[in-house]
Amino acid sequence: MQTRVLTHTSVSEAIIELSYRCQSDAILLGASRENLLSQVLKGNVPLEIAQQTDITVILLRQVEEPEASS
């Protein structure tokens, strides 16, 4: 495993650029917990990536444990 540092004006474009450089078969992304307004203002990175590449994009999200009833 390697660590790489990229500087780019766009997060989604940086991820796409790196995936092509590394000849990636898939891009794994963690799902955001931001609300809809935040996504509209900041952009939806997973959606931007999926729309701009032909590489498989897999979105992962944390499973929330149900609260125990008292």
Image (cartoon, rainbow, N blue to C red):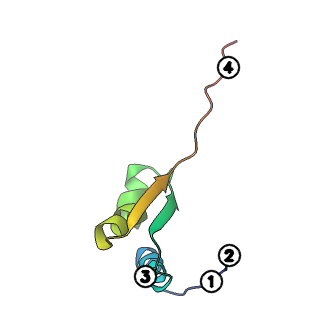
> Which amino acid is tagged 3?
Tyr
**Is mark 4 in CB contact (under 8 Å) with mark 1?**
no
Say which residue appears at 44% left-offset and 49% top-offset. Answer: 35
Q: Residues within 10 Å of mark 4 (few under 14, many from 20)?
A: few
**Is mark 2 in CB contact (under 8 Å) with mark 4?**
no
**Is mark 3 in CB contact (under 8 Å) with mark 1?**
no
Q: Mark 1 highlights which residue?
A: 4
* Image location (x, y in percent) of residue 60: 51, 52
* Image location (x, y in percent) of residue 23: 46, 80
Q: Nearer the viewer, mark 3 or mark 1?
A: 3
Out of 54 and 38, give the one closest to the viewer.
54
Q: Mark 3 highlights which residue?
A: 20
| Helix, strand or loop for disc 4 | loop
Q: Nearer the viewer, mark 1 or mark 2?
A: 2
Q: Which mark is residue 68?
A: 4
> Which amino acid is tagged 2?
Met
Dot 3 or dot 4: first in sequence order is 3
Q: Where, by quadrant of the figure, is residue 6 drawn?
A: bottom right
- Cα distance between the residues tagged 2 and 3: 17 Å
Q: Is residue 35 left or right of residue 64?
A: left
Say which residue appears at 31% left-offset and 73% top-offset. Answer: 52
- Cα distance between the residues tagged 3 and 4: 45 Å
- Cα distance between the residues tagged 2 and 4: 39 Å
> Which amino acid is tagged 1?
Arg
Q: Is residue 21 left or right of residue 2?
A: left
